[in-house]
Image (cartoon, rainbow, N blue to C red):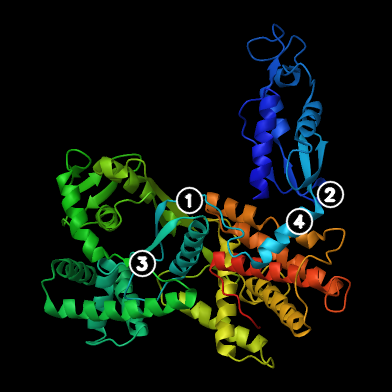
Amino acid sequence: MIKERLEKAVTEALKTLGAGEVNFVVERPATFEHGDYATNAALVAFGALRAPKKKEFDKQGYSKQGTKQASMMVSLHPEFPNTFEFAKGLAERLHGNIEGVEKIEAEGGFVNFFLSREAIAKEVEQASHNEGWGRNDLYKGKKIMVEYTSPNLFKPLHIGNLIGNILGESVARLFENSGGDVKRLNYPSDIGLTVAKGVYGLLKLNIPTPTNIQELGTAYVLGNEDYESGTEADKKRIEEINKKLYEGSDQELNSLREIGIEISRAHLKKLCETLGTKFNQEFFESQSGPIGTELVLANVGKVFEKSDGAIIYRGEHTRVFLNSQGLPTYEAKEIGLFELKTQQYPNFDISLTVTGKEQQDFFKVVFDAIRKIFPDKIMGKQLLHLPTSFLRLTTGKMSSRKGNTITGETLLAGLKEMAKEKMQGRELADADKVAEQVAVGAVKYAVLKQGSGKDIIFDPVKSLSLEGDSGPYVQYAHTRALSLIREAEKAGITPDTSDAPAEAHALERLLLHYPDVLERAAKELEPHYITTYITELASAFNSWYASERVIGGSAPKYGTLLAQAVEKTLQKGLSALGIPAPEKM
Protein backbone atom coordinates (compact mmCIF):
# COMPACT_ATOMS: atom_id res chain seq x y z
CA MET A 1 0.00 0.00 0.00
CA ILE A 2 1.14 3.52 -0.81
CA LYS A 3 0.24 4.66 2.69
CA GLU A 4 2.54 2.04 4.23
CA ARG A 5 5.45 3.20 2.05
CA LEU A 6 4.88 6.78 3.17
CA GLU A 7 4.68 5.83 6.84
CA LYS A 8 7.91 3.84 6.63
CA ALA A 9 9.76 6.64 4.82
CA VAL A 10 8.56 9.28 7.31
CA THR A 11 9.61 7.13 10.27
CA GLU A 12 13.11 6.73 8.86
CA ALA A 13 13.42 10.43 8.04
CA LEU A 14 12.37 11.43 11.56
CA LYS A 15 15.19 9.32 12.96
CA THR A 16 17.72 11.30 10.93
CA LEU A 17 16.28 14.45 12.50
CA GLY A 18 16.72 13.08 15.99
CA ALA A 19 12.99 12.94 16.66
CA GLY A 20 12.82 9.27 17.64
CA GLU A 21 9.43 7.50 17.72
CA VAL A 22 6.36 9.71 17.50
CA ASN A 23 2.71 8.93 16.87
CA PHE A 24 1.91 10.57 13.55
CA VAL A 25 -0.71 9.88 10.89
CA VAL A 26 -0.63 9.72 7.12
CA GLU A 27 -4.04 10.39 5.58
CA ARG A 28 -5.92 11.96 2.71
CA PRO A 29 -5.95 15.76 3.07
CA ALA A 30 -9.19 17.72 3.08
CA THR A 31 -8.70 18.74 -0.57
CA PHE A 32 -6.48 17.41 -3.35
CA GLU A 33 -4.88 20.87 -3.59
CA HIS A 34 -2.84 19.72 -0.60
CA GLY A 35 -1.75 16.49 -2.26
CA ASP A 36 -2.87 12.88 -2.35
CA TYR A 37 -1.60 12.24 1.19
CA ALA A 38 -0.48 14.45 4.07
CA THR A 39 1.20 13.82 7.42
CA ASN A 40 1.26 15.69 10.71
CA ALA A 41 4.62 14.07 11.57
CA ALA A 42 6.51 17.39 11.64
CA LEU A 43 3.92 18.97 13.90
CA VAL A 44 4.01 16.08 16.37
CA ALA A 45 7.78 15.56 16.28
CA PHE A 46 8.63 19.23 16.70
CA GLY A 47 6.26 19.40 19.66
CA ALA A 48 8.32 16.70 21.33
CA LEU A 49 11.50 18.69 20.66
CA ARG A 50 10.44 21.77 22.57
CA ALA A 51 10.88 22.77 26.19
CA PRO A 52 9.85 25.79 28.30
CA LYS A 53 12.39 28.53 28.96
CA LYS A 54 13.91 27.88 32.34
CA LYS A 55 13.62 30.11 35.39
CA GLU A 56 10.96 32.32 33.88
CA PHE A 57 7.88 30.70 35.43
CA ASP A 58 6.29 30.47 38.81
CA LYS A 59 4.81 27.26 40.17
CA GLN A 60 1.49 27.81 38.36
CA GLY A 61 3.22 27.98 34.97
CA TYR A 62 3.02 31.75 34.47
CA SER A 63 5.86 34.16 33.79
CA LYS A 64 6.24 37.36 35.76
CA GLN A 65 4.30 39.12 33.03
CA GLY A 66 1.47 36.56 33.31
CA THR A 67 2.29 34.80 30.02
CA LYS A 68 1.15 31.20 29.85
CA GLN A 69 3.94 28.60 29.85
CA ALA A 70 2.77 27.03 26.58
CA SER A 71 3.49 30.27 24.70
CA MET A 72 7.08 30.40 25.94
CA MET A 73 8.30 27.14 24.46
CA VAL A 74 11.68 27.05 22.71
CA SER A 75 13.08 24.62 20.19
CA LEU A 76 15.68 22.09 21.31
CA HIS A 77 16.66 21.32 17.71
CA PRO A 78 19.83 23.11 16.55
CA GLU A 79 18.67 23.45 12.90
CA PHE A 80 14.98 24.28 13.12
CA PRO A 81 13.64 27.18 15.20
CA ASN A 82 9.96 26.49 14.44
CA THR A 83 7.48 23.90 13.18
CA PHE A 84 7.47 25.14 9.59
CA GLU A 85 11.24 24.94 9.30
CA PHE A 86 11.14 21.46 10.79
CA ALA A 87 8.49 20.43 8.23
CA LYS A 88 10.69 21.81 5.43
CA GLY A 89 13.63 19.81 6.78
CA LEU A 90 11.52 16.66 6.90
CA ALA A 91 10.28 17.25 3.33
CA GLU A 92 13.85 17.69 2.08
CA ARG A 93 14.94 14.38 3.60
CA LEU A 94 11.93 12.61 2.07
CA HIS A 95 12.26 14.08 -1.43
CA GLY A 96 13.25 11.53 -4.04
CA ASN A 97 13.18 8.62 -1.58
CA ILE A 98 9.61 7.35 -1.97
CA GLU A 99 8.51 5.28 -4.95
CA GLY A 100 5.53 6.78 -6.76
CA VAL A 101 5.79 10.23 -5.12
CA GLU A 102 6.40 13.06 -7.58
CA LYS A 103 6.37 16.10 -5.31
CA ILE A 104 6.64 16.79 -1.56
CA GLU A 105 5.73 20.13 -0.03
CA ALA A 106 5.85 21.57 3.48
CA GLU A 107 2.85 23.63 4.50
CA GLY A 108 2.63 24.95 8.03
CA GLY A 109 3.37 21.97 10.24
CA PHE A 110 2.30 19.45 7.61
CA VAL A 111 4.06 17.65 4.79
CA ASN A 112 2.02 16.98 1.64
CA PHE A 113 2.68 14.21 -0.89
CA PHE A 114 1.68 14.35 -4.56
CA LEU A 115 1.74 11.02 -6.40
CA SER A 116 3.11 10.67 -9.91
CA ARG A 117 0.78 10.12 -12.85
CA GLU A 118 2.24 6.64 -13.32
CA ALA A 119 1.62 5.68 -9.68
CA ILE A 120 -2.01 6.74 -9.84
CA ALA A 121 -2.60 4.90 -13.12
CA LYS A 122 -0.99 1.81 -11.63
CA GLU A 123 -3.40 1.88 -8.68
CA VAL A 124 -6.36 2.25 -11.07
CA GLU A 125 -5.10 -0.77 -12.99
CA GLN A 126 -4.72 -2.78 -9.76
CA ALA A 127 -8.20 -1.81 -8.61
CA SER A 128 -9.71 -2.84 -11.94
CA HIS A 129 -8.67 -6.50 -11.90
CA ASN A 130 -6.83 -7.50 -8.69
CA GLU A 131 -9.36 -9.11 -6.35
CA GLY A 132 -6.99 -8.69 -3.41
CA TRP A 133 -6.65 -4.94 -3.94
CA GLY A 134 -7.89 -3.06 -0.90
CA ARG A 135 -7.53 -5.88 1.60
CA ASN A 136 -5.09 -5.67 4.53
CA ASP A 137 -3.45 -7.91 7.14
CA LEU A 138 -4.57 -6.02 10.24
CA TYR A 139 -6.11 -9.17 11.79
CA LYS A 140 -4.06 -11.77 9.94
CA GLY A 141 -3.81 -14.98 11.98
CA LYS A 142 -6.44 -13.82 14.49
CA LYS A 143 -9.34 -16.10 15.37
CA ILE A 144 -12.39 -13.97 16.01
CA MET A 145 -15.88 -14.76 17.30
CA VAL A 146 -18.58 -12.24 16.38
CA GLU A 147 -21.91 -12.73 18.15
CA TYR A 148 -24.84 -10.74 16.83
CA THR A 149 -28.60 -10.70 16.13
CA SER A 150 -29.40 -12.97 19.13
CA PRO A 151 -33.17 -12.33 19.30
CA ASN A 152 -35.80 -13.41 21.75
CA LEU A 153 -37.64 -16.23 20.02
CA PHE A 154 -41.42 -16.63 20.14
CA LYS A 155 -42.01 -13.32 18.37
CA PRO A 156 -41.07 -11.53 15.12
CA LEU A 157 -37.56 -10.13 14.80
CA HIS A 158 -37.51 -6.78 16.57
CA ILE A 159 -36.04 -3.75 14.83
CA GLY A 160 -33.20 -3.72 17.38
CA ASN A 161 -32.22 -7.26 16.36
CA LEU A 162 -32.30 -6.15 12.72
CA ILE A 163 -29.87 -3.34 13.50
CA GLY A 164 -27.66 -5.76 15.45
CA ASN A 165 -27.62 -8.12 12.49
CA ILE A 166 -26.68 -5.33 10.09
CA LEU A 167 -23.84 -3.98 12.24
CA GLY A 168 -22.59 -7.42 13.28
CA GLU A 169 -22.48 -8.76 9.73
CA SER A 170 -20.58 -5.72 8.49
CA VAL A 171 -18.02 -5.91 11.31
CA ALA A 172 -17.55 -9.64 10.62
CA ARG A 173 -16.80 -8.74 7.00
CA LEU A 174 -14.36 -6.02 8.05
CA PHE A 175 -12.46 -8.60 10.09
CA GLU A 176 -12.42 -11.00 7.12
CA ASN A 177 -11.24 -8.30 4.71
CA SER A 178 -8.39 -7.68 7.14
CA GLY A 179 -7.20 -11.30 7.28
CA GLY A 180 -9.20 -12.49 10.30
CA ASP A 181 -10.59 -16.01 10.69
CA VAL A 182 -14.17 -15.17 11.67
CA LYS A 183 -16.85 -17.35 13.25
CA ARG A 184 -20.35 -15.87 13.18
CA LEU A 185 -22.37 -16.76 16.28
CA ASN A 186 -26.04 -16.35 17.11
CA TYR A 187 -27.43 -16.63 20.62
CA PRO A 188 -31.23 -16.72 20.51
CA SER A 189 -33.23 -16.65 23.73
CA ASP A 190 -35.19 -19.93 23.61
CA ILE A 191 -36.16 -20.02 27.28
CA GLY A 192 -36.92 -17.52 30.00
CA LEU A 193 -39.61 -14.98 30.78
CA THR A 194 -40.14 -13.94 27.13
CA VAL A 195 -40.87 -17.52 26.10
CA ALA A 196 -43.02 -18.05 29.20
CA LYS A 197 -45.13 -15.02 28.26
CA GLY A 198 -45.59 -16.47 24.77
CA VAL A 199 -46.59 -19.90 26.05
CA TYR A 200 -49.02 -18.28 28.50
CA GLY A 201 -50.52 -16.28 25.63
CA LEU A 202 -50.99 -19.40 23.48
CA LEU A 203 -52.80 -21.11 26.35
CA LYS A 204 -55.04 -18.11 26.96
CA LEU A 205 -55.84 -17.79 23.23
CA ASN A 206 -56.46 -21.54 23.06
CA ILE A 207 -53.89 -22.13 20.30
CA PRO A 208 -52.60 -25.65 21.05
CA THR A 209 -50.59 -25.88 17.81
CA PRO A 210 -49.32 -22.53 16.50
CA THR A 211 -48.39 -22.48 12.80
CA ASN A 212 -46.80 -19.08 12.11
CA ILE A 213 -44.78 -16.26 13.64
CA GLN A 214 -47.78 -13.90 13.70
CA GLU A 215 -49.64 -16.20 16.12
CA LEU A 216 -46.56 -16.31 18.34
CA GLY A 217 -46.25 -12.54 18.24
CA THR A 218 -49.90 -12.06 19.21
CA ALA A 219 -49.52 -14.54 22.06
CA TYR A 220 -46.40 -12.79 23.34
CA VAL A 221 -48.05 -9.35 23.30
CA LEU A 222 -50.97 -10.74 25.32
CA GLY A 223 -48.61 -12.44 27.80
CA ASN A 224 -46.52 -9.32 28.19
CA GLU A 225 -49.58 -7.13 28.80
CA ASP A 226 -50.89 -9.51 31.48
CA TYR A 227 -47.47 -9.69 33.12
CA GLU A 228 -47.01 -5.92 33.26
CA SER A 229 -50.60 -4.70 33.72
CA GLY A 230 -52.70 -7.75 34.62
CA THR A 231 -53.57 -9.25 37.97
CA GLU A 232 -51.12 -10.68 40.47
CA ALA A 233 -52.53 -14.11 39.57
CA ASP A 234 -51.61 -13.56 35.89
CA LYS A 235 -48.06 -12.54 36.79
CA LYS A 236 -47.69 -15.48 39.17
CA ARG A 237 -48.98 -17.88 36.50
CA ILE A 238 -46.38 -16.66 33.97
CA GLU A 239 -43.61 -17.02 36.55
CA GLU A 240 -44.79 -20.57 37.30
CA ILE A 241 -44.70 -21.39 33.58
CA ASN A 242 -41.20 -19.97 33.39
CA LYS A 243 -40.01 -22.18 36.26
CA LYS A 244 -41.67 -25.31 34.83
CA LEU A 245 -40.11 -24.68 31.42
CA TYR A 246 -36.67 -24.47 33.05
CA GLU A 247 -37.34 -27.70 34.90
CA GLY A 248 -38.92 -29.41 31.89
CA SER A 249 -41.57 -30.77 34.21
CA ASP A 250 -44.75 -30.10 32.20
CA GLN A 251 -45.27 -31.95 28.91
CA GLU A 252 -47.94 -29.59 27.55
CA LEU A 253 -45.87 -26.50 28.25
CA ASN A 254 -42.74 -28.11 26.83
CA SER A 255 -44.59 -29.06 23.66
CA LEU A 256 -45.87 -25.52 23.11
CA ARG A 257 -42.38 -24.15 23.71
CA GLU A 258 -40.75 -26.58 21.25
CA ILE A 259 -43.30 -25.84 18.50
CA GLY A 260 -42.86 -22.10 19.00
CA ILE A 261 -39.07 -22.33 18.97
CA GLU A 262 -39.10 -24.33 15.73
CA ILE A 263 -41.37 -21.77 14.02
CA SER A 264 -39.24 -18.87 15.30
CA ARG A 265 -35.96 -20.41 14.13
CA ALA A 266 -37.31 -21.09 10.63
CA HIS A 267 -38.58 -17.52 10.47
CA LEU A 268 -35.24 -16.14 11.68
CA LYS A 269 -33.28 -18.23 9.18
CA LYS A 270 -35.32 -16.93 6.26
CA LEU A 271 -34.88 -13.31 7.32
CA CYS A 272 -31.13 -13.75 7.84
CA GLU A 273 -30.86 -15.19 4.33
CA THR A 274 -32.52 -12.04 3.00
CA LEU A 275 -29.97 -9.97 4.95
CA GLY A 276 -27.03 -12.04 3.68
CA THR A 277 -26.09 -13.64 7.00
CA LYS A 278 -25.23 -17.27 7.61
CA PHE A 279 -24.11 -18.27 11.10
CA ASN A 280 -21.37 -20.79 11.84
CA GLN A 281 -22.83 -21.70 15.22
CA GLU A 282 -25.94 -21.14 17.30
CA PHE A 283 -25.97 -21.32 21.08
CA PHE A 284 -29.16 -21.19 23.15
CA GLU A 285 -30.08 -19.96 26.60
CA SER A 286 -31.49 -23.39 27.38
CA GLN A 287 -27.89 -24.62 27.02
CA SER A 288 -26.10 -21.74 28.72
CA GLY A 289 -28.47 -21.41 31.69
CA PRO A 290 -27.63 -24.70 33.50
CA ILE A 291 -23.90 -24.28 32.82
CA GLY A 292 -23.95 -20.70 34.06
CA THR A 293 -25.86 -21.74 37.18
CA GLU A 294 -23.22 -24.34 38.08
CA LEU A 295 -20.35 -21.92 37.50
CA VAL A 296 -21.95 -19.20 39.62
CA LEU A 297 -22.64 -21.63 42.47
CA ALA A 298 -19.08 -22.95 42.27
CA ASN A 299 -17.71 -19.42 42.68
CA VAL A 300 -19.83 -18.21 45.59
CA GLY A 301 -17.46 -16.74 48.15
CA LYS A 302 -14.78 -16.15 45.53
CA VAL A 303 -16.48 -14.09 42.82
CA PHE A 304 -20.12 -13.98 43.93
CA GLU A 305 -21.93 -13.56 47.22
CA LYS A 306 -25.36 -14.39 48.62
CA SER A 307 -27.86 -11.62 49.27
CA ASP A 308 -31.52 -11.97 50.32
CA GLY A 309 -31.80 -15.44 48.81
CA ALA A 310 -30.18 -14.42 45.51
CA ILE A 311 -26.58 -14.65 44.35
CA ILE A 312 -25.03 -11.38 43.23
CA TYR A 313 -21.83 -9.93 41.84
CA ARG A 314 -20.70 -6.83 43.68
CA GLY A 315 -18.51 -4.55 41.61
CA GLU A 316 -18.76 -1.18 39.87
CA HIS A 317 -22.38 -2.17 39.25
CA THR A 318 -23.99 -4.79 41.51
CA ARG A 319 -26.03 -7.33 39.54
CA VAL A 320 -28.01 -10.48 40.31
CA PHE A 321 -26.74 -13.69 38.68
CA LEU A 322 -29.16 -16.18 40.31
CA ASN A 323 -32.53 -14.90 41.49
CA SER A 324 -34.29 -15.88 44.71
CA GLN A 325 -35.91 -18.82 42.90
CA GLY A 326 -32.46 -20.13 42.01
CA LEU A 327 -33.00 -19.39 38.31
CA PRO A 328 -30.18 -17.92 36.21
CA THR A 329 -30.50 -14.32 35.06
CA TYR A 330 -29.13 -13.08 31.73
CA GLU A 331 -25.85 -12.43 33.55
CA ALA A 332 -25.44 -16.07 34.63
CA LYS A 333 -26.41 -17.26 31.17
CA GLU A 334 -23.61 -15.12 29.71
CA ILE A 335 -21.16 -16.96 31.97
CA GLY A 336 -22.49 -20.26 30.63
CA LEU A 337 -22.33 -18.92 27.08
CA PHE A 338 -18.66 -18.06 27.49
CA GLU A 339 -17.99 -21.64 28.58
CA LEU A 340 -19.87 -22.94 25.51
CA LYS A 341 -17.99 -20.60 23.19
CA THR A 342 -14.60 -21.59 24.51
CA GLN A 343 -15.44 -25.28 24.32
CA GLN A 344 -16.24 -24.81 20.63
CA TYR A 345 -13.50 -22.27 19.83
CA PRO A 346 -10.83 -22.55 22.56
CA ASN A 347 -8.10 -20.72 20.62
CA PHE A 348 -9.93 -17.48 19.95
CA ASP A 349 -8.16 -14.12 20.10
CA ILE A 350 -11.15 -11.76 20.07
CA SER A 351 -14.72 -12.31 21.21
CA LEU A 352 -17.01 -9.49 20.09
CA THR A 353 -20.66 -9.16 21.12
CA VAL A 354 -22.93 -6.77 19.21
CA THR A 355 -25.99 -5.65 21.20
CA GLY A 356 -27.84 -2.48 22.19
CA LYS A 357 -25.95 0.39 23.79
CA GLU A 358 -28.23 0.13 26.83
CA GLN A 359 -26.34 -3.08 27.70
CA GLN A 360 -22.90 -1.48 28.03
CA ASP A 361 -22.94 -1.56 31.84
CA PHE A 362 -24.28 -5.12 31.73
CA PHE A 363 -21.28 -6.29 29.73
CA LYS A 364 -18.80 -4.41 31.89
CA VAL A 365 -19.97 -6.50 34.85
CA VAL A 366 -20.22 -9.76 32.91
CA PHE A 367 -16.76 -9.39 31.36
CA ASP A 368 -15.31 -8.52 34.76
CA ALA A 369 -16.85 -11.66 36.27
CA ILE A 370 -15.62 -13.80 33.35
CA ARG A 371 -12.06 -12.58 33.83
CA LYS A 372 -12.19 -13.65 37.49
CA ILE A 373 -13.82 -17.05 36.84
CA PHE A 374 -11.65 -17.96 33.81
CA PRO A 375 -8.27 -16.26 34.35
CA ASP A 376 -6.39 -18.85 32.28
CA LYS A 377 -8.86 -18.96 29.40
CA ILE A 378 -8.98 -15.20 29.09
CA MET A 379 -5.25 -14.45 29.30
CA GLY A 380 -4.08 -12.51 26.23
CA LYS A 381 -7.56 -12.42 24.72
CA GLN A 382 -9.99 -9.59 24.10
CA LEU A 383 -13.62 -9.42 25.19
CA LEU A 384 -15.37 -6.60 23.35
CA HIS A 385 -18.89 -5.17 23.26
CA LEU A 386 -19.96 -3.09 20.27
CA PRO A 387 -23.11 -1.01 20.93
CA THR A 388 -25.87 -0.72 18.36
CA SER A 389 -28.07 2.31 17.80
CA PHE A 390 -31.71 3.07 18.42
CA LEU A 391 -33.71 3.54 15.23
CA ARG A 392 -36.45 6.14 15.22
CA LEU A 393 -38.85 6.72 12.36
CA THR A 394 -39.43 10.28 11.15
CA THR A 395 -42.92 9.82 12.63
CA GLY A 396 -41.45 9.38 16.14
CA LYS A 397 -40.19 6.66 18.47
CA MET A 398 -41.58 3.17 17.95
CA SER A 399 -43.20 1.25 20.78
CA SER A 400 -41.07 -1.60 22.04
CA ARG A 401 -43.50 -4.03 23.65
CA LYS A 402 -47.02 -3.17 22.65
CA GLY A 403 -48.78 -4.51 19.60
CA ASN A 404 -47.85 -1.60 17.30
CA THR A 405 -44.13 -2.31 17.03
CA ILE A 406 -42.61 -2.11 13.55
CA THR A 407 -40.65 -5.33 13.20
CA GLY A 408 -37.60 -5.99 11.07
CA GLU A 409 -39.57 -7.87 8.44
CA THR A 410 -42.39 -5.32 8.20
CA LEU A 411 -39.84 -2.56 7.68
CA LEU A 412 -38.10 -4.52 4.90
CA ALA A 413 -41.41 -5.55 3.34
CA GLY A 414 -42.61 -1.95 3.26
CA LEU A 415 -39.38 -0.73 1.66
CA LYS A 416 -39.54 -3.54 -0.90
CA GLU A 417 -43.03 -2.49 -2.01
CA MET A 418 -41.92 1.13 -2.26
CA ALA A 419 -38.90 0.08 -4.34
CA LYS A 420 -41.16 -1.90 -6.68
CA GLU A 421 -43.30 1.17 -7.27
CA LYS A 422 -40.22 3.27 -8.09
CA MET A 423 -39.01 0.66 -10.59
CA GLN A 424 -42.26 0.34 -12.50
CA GLY A 425 -41.74 0.57 -16.24
CA ARG A 426 -38.13 -0.67 -16.13
CA GLU A 427 -37.26 -3.88 -17.92
CA LEU A 428 -35.73 -6.15 -15.28
CA ALA A 429 -35.46 -9.93 -15.48
CA ASP A 430 -36.23 -10.35 -11.78
CA ALA A 431 -37.85 -7.17 -10.50
CA ASP A 432 -38.89 -8.79 -7.21
CA LYS A 433 -35.31 -9.79 -6.36
CA VAL A 434 -33.93 -6.38 -7.33
CA ALA A 435 -36.59 -4.65 -5.21
CA GLU A 436 -35.55 -6.79 -2.24
CA GLN A 437 -31.86 -5.95 -2.82
CA VAL A 438 -32.71 -2.24 -2.97
CA ALA A 439 -34.77 -2.49 0.23
CA VAL A 440 -31.94 -4.27 2.05
CA GLY A 441 -29.47 -1.69 0.73
CA ALA A 442 -31.68 1.16 1.89
CA VAL A 443 -32.01 0.02 5.50
CA LYS A 444 -28.42 -1.23 5.84
CA TYR A 445 -27.00 2.02 4.53
CA ALA A 446 -29.20 4.04 6.89
CA VAL A 447 -27.93 2.01 9.86
CA LEU A 448 -24.26 1.89 8.84
CA LYS A 449 -23.81 5.52 7.85
CA GLN A 450 -23.92 6.39 11.56
CA GLY A 451 -21.16 5.68 14.04
CA SER A 452 -21.94 2.70 16.26
CA GLY A 453 -24.15 3.62 19.21
CA LYS A 454 -25.50 6.79 17.59
CA ASP A 455 -29.26 7.04 17.16
CA ILE A 456 -30.72 6.71 13.67
CA ILE A 457 -33.52 8.88 12.31
CA PHE A 458 -34.96 6.73 9.54
CA ASP A 459 -36.95 8.27 6.71
CA PRO A 460 -38.28 5.47 4.43
CA VAL A 461 -38.72 7.79 1.45
CA LYS A 462 -35.24 9.33 1.66
CA SER A 463 -33.69 5.91 2.25
CA LEU A 464 -34.78 4.89 -1.29
CA SER A 465 -33.69 8.11 -2.98
CA LEU A 466 -31.40 7.97 -6.02
CA GLU A 467 -30.22 11.54 -5.39
CA GLY A 468 -27.43 10.79 -2.91
CA ASP A 469 -26.75 9.79 0.71
CA SER A 470 -28.59 6.49 0.36
CA GLY A 471 -27.87 2.85 -0.33
CA PRO A 472 -29.78 2.84 -3.64
CA TYR A 473 -27.75 5.87 -4.79
CA VAL A 474 -24.52 3.90 -4.43
CA GLN A 475 -26.10 0.75 -5.86
CA TYR A 476 -27.27 2.72 -8.89
CA ALA A 477 -23.80 4.20 -9.47
CA HIS A 478 -22.49 0.63 -9.46
CA THR A 479 -25.02 -0.44 -12.10
CA ARG A 480 -24.12 2.61 -14.25
CA ALA A 481 -20.46 1.59 -14.16
CA LEU A 482 -21.42 -1.94 -15.19
CA SER A 483 -23.56 -0.56 -18.02
CA LEU A 484 -20.64 1.51 -19.32
CA ILE A 485 -18.34 -1.52 -19.18
CA ARG A 486 -20.85 -3.63 -21.14
CA GLU A 487 -21.19 -0.93 -23.80
CA ALA A 488 -17.41 -0.65 -24.10
CA GLU A 489 -17.14 -4.41 -24.53
CA LYS A 490 -19.73 -4.29 -27.34
CA ALA A 491 -17.64 -1.56 -29.00
CA GLY A 492 -14.54 -3.78 -28.82
CA ILE A 493 -12.63 -1.52 -26.45
CA THR A 494 -9.80 -3.17 -24.52
CA PRO A 495 -9.26 -1.48 -21.14
CA ASP A 496 -5.65 -0.48 -20.42
CA THR A 497 -3.46 2.55 -19.61
CA SER A 498 -2.11 3.19 -23.12
CA ASP A 499 -4.23 6.31 -23.74
CA ALA A 500 -4.30 7.63 -20.17
CA PRO A 501 -4.66 11.45 -20.04
CA ALA A 502 -1.62 13.43 -18.93
CA GLU A 503 -3.37 14.67 -15.79
CA ALA A 504 -5.12 12.45 -13.26
CA HIS A 505 -8.81 13.08 -12.70
CA ALA A 506 -10.11 13.69 -9.16
CA LEU A 507 -12.02 10.40 -9.48
CA GLU A 508 -8.74 8.49 -9.86
CA ARG A 509 -7.15 10.25 -6.91
CA LEU A 510 -10.17 9.44 -4.74
CA LEU A 511 -10.26 5.83 -5.90
CA LEU A 512 -6.82 4.96 -4.60
CA HIS A 513 -7.85 5.66 -0.98
CA TYR A 514 -10.22 2.72 -0.60
CA PRO A 515 -7.57 0.46 1.06
CA ASP A 516 -6.90 3.17 3.66
CA VAL A 517 -10.60 3.59 4.41
CA LEU A 518 -11.12 -0.16 4.76
CA GLU A 519 -8.17 -0.43 7.15
CA ARG A 520 -9.41 2.42 9.33
CA ALA A 521 -12.93 0.98 9.44
CA ALA A 522 -11.53 -2.40 10.50
CA LYS A 523 -9.18 -0.91 13.08
CA GLU A 524 -11.92 1.16 14.74
CA LEU A 525 -14.76 -1.32 14.00
CA GLU A 526 -16.69 1.52 12.39
CA PRO A 527 -18.31 0.65 9.03
CA HIS A 528 -19.51 4.24 8.60
CA TYR A 529 -16.10 5.20 7.18
CA ILE A 530 -16.79 2.92 4.22
CA THR A 531 -20.36 4.21 3.86
CA THR A 532 -19.08 7.79 3.64
CA TYR A 533 -16.32 6.84 1.20
CA ILE A 534 -18.40 4.86 -1.29
CA THR A 535 -21.00 7.64 -1.33
CA GLU A 536 -18.27 10.13 -2.20
CA LEU A 537 -16.87 7.75 -4.82
CA ALA A 538 -20.33 7.24 -6.35
CA SER A 539 -20.80 11.02 -6.54
CA ALA A 540 -17.39 11.52 -8.14
CA PHE A 541 -18.10 8.76 -10.67
CA ASN A 542 -21.49 10.24 -11.59
CA SER A 543 -19.88 13.64 -12.19
CA TRP A 544 -17.13 12.07 -14.30
CA TYR A 545 -19.67 9.94 -16.17
CA ALA A 546 -21.73 13.04 -17.02
CA SER A 547 -18.77 15.11 -18.25
CA GLU A 548 -16.43 12.60 -19.86
CA ARG A 549 -17.08 10.84 -23.16
CA VAL A 550 -15.61 7.35 -22.92
CA ILE A 551 -16.80 5.53 -26.05
CA GLY A 552 -15.76 7.74 -28.96
CA GLY A 553 -13.75 10.02 -26.69
CA SER A 554 -10.01 10.73 -26.51
CA ALA A 555 -9.22 8.03 -23.91
CA PRO A 556 -11.68 5.12 -24.36
CA LYS A 557 -9.28 2.45 -23.12
CA TYR A 558 -8.32 4.23 -19.94
CA GLY A 559 -11.86 5.46 -19.40
CA THR A 560 -13.13 1.88 -19.52
CA LEU A 561 -10.33 0.79 -17.18
CA LEU A 562 -11.31 3.52 -14.71
CA ALA A 563 -14.97 2.48 -14.92
CA GLN A 564 -13.93 -1.10 -14.14
CA ALA A 565 -11.90 0.07 -11.15
CA VAL A 566 -14.81 2.13 -9.82
CA GLU A 567 -17.27 -0.75 -10.33
CA LYS A 568 -15.08 -3.22 -8.45
CA THR A 569 -14.35 -0.74 -5.65
CA LEU A 570 -18.02 0.12 -5.19
CA GLN A 571 -18.83 -3.59 -5.20
CA LYS A 572 -16.16 -4.27 -2.56
CA GLY A 573 -17.34 -1.39 -0.41
CA LEU A 574 -20.97 -2.50 -0.64
CA SER A 575 -19.95 -6.08 0.14
CA ALA A 576 -17.99 -4.96 3.21
CA LEU A 577 -21.22 -3.39 4.45
CA GLY A 578 -23.27 -6.47 3.57
CA ILE A 579 -25.22 -4.49 0.94
CA PRO A 580 -26.17 -6.29 -2.31
CA ALA A 581 -24.81 -4.89 -5.58
CA PRO A 582 -27.46 -5.47 -8.29
CA GLU A 583 -26.28 -5.64 -11.90
CA LYS A 584 -29.32 -3.69 -13.10
CA MET A 585 -31.81 -1.38 -11.38
Disc on the earlier residue, 2 or 1:
2
Q: Amino acid at mark 4?
A: Ile
Q: Amino acid at mark 1?
A: Tyr
Q: Residue 120 falls in which quadrant of the image?
A: bottom right
User: Residue drawn 30% across and 56% down?
Assistant: 345
Disc on the earlier residue, 4 or 1:
4
In the picture, the quarter occupied by the C terminus is: bottom right
Disc on the earlier residue, 3 or 1:
1
Q: At which x and y percent is residue 493?
A: 78, 78
- As drawn, is 456 to the left or to the right of 303? right
User: Residue drawn 64% across and 90% down?
Assistant: 428
- Front residue of this view, candidates 493 and 567: 493
- Mark 3 element type: loop
Q: Residue 527 falls in which quadrant of the image?
A: bottom right
Callout 4–callout 3 Cβ contact below 8 Å: no
How many neighbours does mark 1 have within 10 angstroms: few (below 14), some (14-19), or many (20 or more)?
Answer: some
Residue 309 in sight: no
**Residue at image mark 1:** 139
**Distance of label 4 from label 1 (alpha carbons):** 27 Å
Callout 4–callout 2 Cβ contact below 8 Å: no
Q: At which x and y percent is residue 380?
A: 36, 41
- Mark 4 element type: helix
Q: At which x and y percent is residue 335?
A: 26, 52
Disc ID at residue 277: none
**Residue at image mark 3:** 280
Disc ID at residue 33: 2
- Mark 1 element type: loop
Report the mark closest to the observer, 4 or 1.
4
Report the mark closest to the observer, 4 or 2.
4
**Residue at image mark 4:** 120
**Distance of label 4 from label 3 (alpha carbons):** 40 Å
